Amino acid sequence: MKKQTIRDIDWQGKRALVRVDFNVPLDDQQQITDDTRITAAVPTIQYLLDHGASVVLMSHLGRPKNKVVDKLRLDPVARRLGDLLSREVKKVGETTGAEAEQAAQSLQSGDVLLLENTRFDAREEKNDDSMAQELAKLGDVYVNDAFGAAHRAHASTEGVAKHLPAVAGLLLEKELEYIGGAIEDPQRPFVTVIGGAKISDKIGVIENLLGKVDALLIGGGMANTFLLAQGHKVGDSLVEQESVDVAKDLLQKAADRNVKLLLPVDVVLADAFDNNANTQIVAADAVPDGWRILDIGPESVEQYSAVIKDAKTVIWNGPMGVFEMPKFAEGTRAIAQAMADSAATTIIGGGDSVAAVEQMHLADRMSHISTGGGASLELLEGKELPGVAALKDQ
Ligand code: ADP
Ligand code: MG
């Protein structure tokens, strides 16, 4: 990795100001329903504590829309983190200001302090430099470990890095090594599986990857627009008429570059968007009127699985069908299984794709599950993330 990390700093007696992604789901009692994001930040925090630092943590949570929302305070997060670290995590009720400064200054080596939700402050999302400067007063060195927020140029993710020595945390490093590494220097064959609802969300990803992959396997709702571009009828399926020309162009580019681009050869049809709908499996060029495509079919699964089996690197973004409904989850499940069984380096990016793999209990059989949906997409599009660009070069 081309950026300095926490391993490049002598932490003894220093205060680390660490941006983490503690944007966890809460129920209506403010109980944390999934603490994956907190656990994912523990290695960096533990490393800093083990090396003699004190730690000041900052994160956003939810969408408070630039004002204090009591239900989005980070106190439940502080308690859960304290349990995970087996030590006290102090918490202040503001993100910057006199109380936060006082609390940060009184930290001893080994102490942990959590600041209040960064998005309570209207200056955060504007990347206002006055907020960045106030944050910078709270630490000696800035650490970005919030991969899930690294595609945003906010005061706590990018602005603050201008005012302190700034390095990557271990989670951010791991995400960049897996996703960035796969894109820049993949073990071949390099295969990408792309799905999800809309082609328009992923055009940038497909364009960028067409120049890098050996094979592109397409499923999900977006495949419908490609089928239309090939002149097939897709009945009542989700399509983006305005993207048909883009799909044609992508098919042409794939052909020109000798990239194997696979579209579903068969599909699961339903007569309504409903798990209790009537279903049938037909060839992808034989979709009757009045039916809609909600999953890829078994023949497609077989073809895609064979490509995945022979791959050395596989990146997957976007479910193959409406996996939230059991009747249309089989394509997604089978592709997840093929990846789990493959000897390739397997990487899952995208919020819904990660949810699908977890739902199928296959997460621990993948090489890497990304903690950032939006950020992983931007990496796949070949973009530099502002929260990474701002860090010190090696
Ligand atoms: P990710 O979050 O992994 O990037 P997306 O957000 O792009 O994935 O897409 C996920 C959504 O796509 C899921 O909610 C799924 O139901 C939907 N989807 C997949 N296939 C179809 C389809 N054939 N028709 C309609 N929606 C689909
Ligand atoms: Mg999604």
Image (spheres, rainbow, N blue to C red):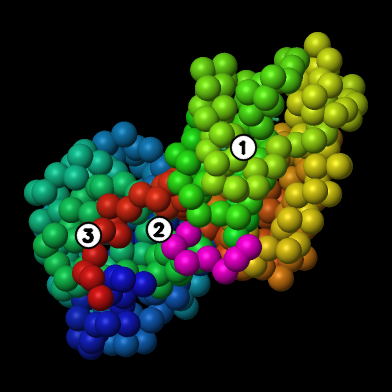
Give 264 or 84, whichever is nearer the viewer.
264
Residue 196, numbered circle: 1
Which comes before the other along the chain, label 2 or label 3? Answer: 2
- Identity of the residue drawn at 85% across and 29% down: 283
Q: In which quarter of the image is residue 78?
A: bottom left
In this rendering, which labeled residue sits more in front, label 2 or label 3? 3
Disc marking residue 390: 3
Magenta stretch contains residue 187:
yes
Residue at numbered disc 2: 147
Q: Is mark 1 on a helix, strand or loop?
A: loop
How much space separates mark 1 and mark 3, taking CA atoms?
31 Å
Please say if the residues under marks 1 and 3 sit with CB atoms less than 8 Å apart: no
Q: Is residue 89 magenta?
A: no
Q: Tell me if residue 4 comes above or below residue 233 in the rendering.
A: below
Q: Residue at x 11, y 49 (%)?
A: 129
> Which amino acid is tagged 1?
Gly
